[in-house]
Amino acid sequence: RQPKHLSDYAAPDYLIETVDLDFHLEPERTIVHADLAMRPNPEAKAARPLVLDGEGVELISIAVDGKPLQPDEYSATETGLTVPDVPTGPFTLSLKTACNPEANEALLGLYRSNGAFCTQCEPEGFRRITFFLDRPDVLATYRVRLEADKKTNPVLLSNGNPVERGDVEGTDRHYAVWEDPHPKPSYLFAAVAGDLAKISDSFTTQSGREVALNIYVEHGKEDRCDWAMESLKNAMKWDEERFGREYDLDVFNIVAVSDFNMGAMENKGLNIFNDKLVLARPDTASDADYAAIEGVIAHEYFHNWTGNRITCRDWFQLCLKEGLTVFRDQEFSADLRAGPVKRILDVRNLKSRQFPEDSGPLAHPVRPGSYIEINNFYTATVYEKGAELCRMLQTMLGRDDFRKGLDLYFERHDGQAVTVEDFLAALADASGKDLSEFMHWYNQAGTPELACSLDYDQQSKTATLNVSQILPATPGQPNKEPMPIPLRIGLLGPNGDDLPLTLEDGTELSDGLLEVTEREQSFTFTGIPTPPTPSLLREFSAPVRLTQTIDLEQIEFLMMHDSDPFNRWQAAQSYAAKLLTDAARDRYNPEPVKGQGASRLAKALAVTANEEELAYAYRGEMLKLPSESDIARELARNIDTDAIREARETLRETIGNAIHADLAGIYEELADTGPYSPDGISAGKRSMRIAALDLLVGSGKDDELERAAAHYRGATNMTDAIYSLLILAPHDDPRRDEAMADFYERWKDDALVLDKWFAVQARSARPDSVEIVEGLLSHPKFSLKNPNRVRALIGSFANGNPTGFNRKDGAGYEFLAECALRIDKFNPHMAARLLGAFESWRFLEPNREAHAKATLEGLANAELSTDSYEIVSKTLG
Ligand code: B3K
Ligand code: ZN
């Protein structure tokens, strides 16, 4: 349980040039022969013993250059293999090992999902397959032979291109050989064997390479693959056009499995997916599912260049591939769909998942300086904040220079394992911009606060924007250096138009982009005839918390006029958040969410919702109130989740009644969306209509609850079905029970859809939520062993039901702790993830805080895996 430190990085003592693997696949005892062509690393200091990583691997035999080693010539343990004496030049290490896929419930290394063999190696799973230098800076080419029973495993897949296949004479077995010409680290290794169905297509790259595309799924799911295939082809084309990146093998295979710890994995030429992120049919997947599939298919594909061709030197550099690849998939989705709406969704996601992490006990830099268990660092900070850093770089360099910088990065480092410094050096060299200060963004944790105020001077007709950056202390980092912050702004004149921005020195800011570099800085704009309304942090140009002296009237003005769609939406959110926090602070006070401010907000929302030039999806976002966790974050301290909910429900009621006619009009007008299509416009209509329905039901009128019930009954696609079910779920009403039962009956044998049924109940805010969720643990369809089901029930409860999880009596905390302890015994990775839900416990009101603390202390005294130990001990602080 000792932390590892970035500052201790040392190059590997040995290198592996080629890897030859031969798998004899058997569910309970798989034998692996590995021939590793090795040599001492010329960059390493002195000759040292060869130490390979291993975890739970049984060593059967070992030889060096064909000569078997005697037991006193090596030592094999639970955690590795040491050979004190190896040749000083190149040599071949041959290993014969065994592992048990069937018993592998951690789902790392080689395991079984629904009767198929599959693998998950990132970050350190390969060492569960054989002994190896299981670190990302050891790159080798692989040749893999898979042999298995032919009847139960007609499909045999690994990385790279297929080179040979045939029957093993005189047996029921067959084999396939795969070769991957691109050197890769072990974490990108993958193998799959099983009885799977496939759908195929092809793609011709810009240079004319014909690539065979296959998606493998469990039998019976072939009719749910079209969207993933279309998304893949779109991603391949987009990466050529936007970043000049072409695919580099003859085949690209995707396999969807039902037991998977996370979303998907970018193994070279053989992406393995959680089936949730592949399978979609209009009646089984919602618009959000379709969008997620599109985004993740693209994300994993984009890794082929950002992650695979150029990989990370060590796991501290994880953001190098993840932040950049998330940025790329965000840009892809924004280009395919309404861009501003995608930005809104991404920022909302960042604020709801990354901001709390960055302000809590688990805060860490985008490039962490230390970790105990690297699996705990696949975080919103590394991914989503990491993506924001790439976005800021693009903003500051401009799109063209950013592209040039990436081109140089690919040219310089293809085939290498590199660092964040290498990435920034390429961008700096290509653009001529000094990026040395930007490194602080990677090394300093915490969300900067950008405190802004605008002074207007009537005499000189100037407006001065005063900015200070406040860098909060985070664990282990009390003091911080100022960072370069791209701040995009506009100043609105009295009619709502943007005023020209001229700085004192005469510089015209055509794009409104300022660069804040100091702790305190002022920018003076000349020729401003009357006091302007500032629109700051347009497009959310930096991942900061903006605070400014601005009154409700100005916010309302921005809500009506801001030419920046992001800030226009942000204004509506800020307005609502102000009312909601005023109502929920200290003790619940209904005035702000019932009074004049609330009616003004309602009217402004109605105006925007009726603006036909705006995209449906955008208007839908406008109609969504800040979530309960958004409000909690705004309050920042002394959080009472019941008061927050009451405030939000009251505002929903006020708005639902105040603009009832507008909402009902929208609802009716958008009734006919035609046959289902996942495209942005159709999805936008559904989203806007459901947002209107949500507010209508919020009005509290029985007619409106009936409307929601009818919506459910009339649904012809999963989007309409699941959102109306969500709206009905908290109500004590026979129509709710009916809908819930109907959904169950219809989908009880479809795992992915049934997950939604579990999730809806887990998320629904009711006084008895804890008991409901506890009861569902014993439902015959529930299993702790399937990660999707665990996330659907336990994860949705802990992260999507703030009042239930934070119930006053502490029962929600106890429930989560018990579940996590049970799961920790066999899948530590999953358990540690769930425990992340405690990250904001210190901001709760004293009574809840005490309950959470007691639960965490109980956990700390239990027997925990390293994964969970790291989360619990750091959370307690
Ligand atoms: N690189 C994988 C994540 C691996 C997570 C390991 N705990 C998927 C992705 O980010 O694309
Ligand atoms: Zn990724």
Image: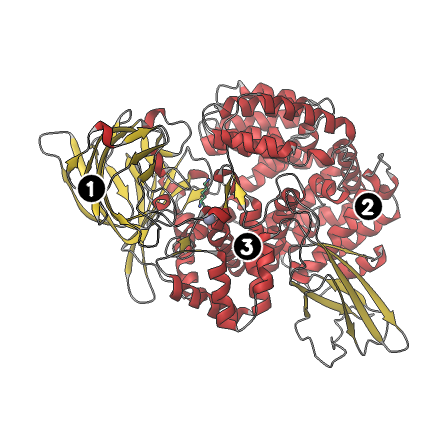
Q: Which residue is mark 3?
A: 387
Would residue 75 appear left or right of 510 to someone viewing this image?
left
Residue projecting furthest to the front? 46
Q: From the top left corner, tell me how far across and down residue 841 is, in percent.
A: 69, 33
Q: From the top left corner, tell me how far across and down residue 625 is, in percent.
A: 72, 45
Amino acid carrying label 1: it is Ala
Identified at 74% across, 80% down, the residue is 505
Residue 176's tag is 1
Secondary structure under the numbered disc 3 in the rendered image: helix
Instruction: State how far apart marks 3 and 2 are (Cα).
Output: 31 Å
Q: Which residue is mark 2?
A: 579
Q: Nearer the viewer, residue 71 or 120?
A: 71
Residue projecting furthest to the left? 170
Q: Earlier in the sequence, mark 1 or mark 3?
A: 1
Amino acid carrying label 3: it is Ala
Crowding at label 2, few (<14), some or many (≥20) Cα neighbours within 10 Å? Answer: many
Q: Quadrant of residue 265?
A: top left
What number of labels is visible? 3
Q: Is residue 283 above or below residue 678?
A: above
Q: From the top left corner, tell me how far across and down residue 51 is, in percent.
A: 33, 38
Q: Earlier in the sequence, mark 2 or mark 1?
A: 1
Quadrant in the picture for the C terminus:
top right
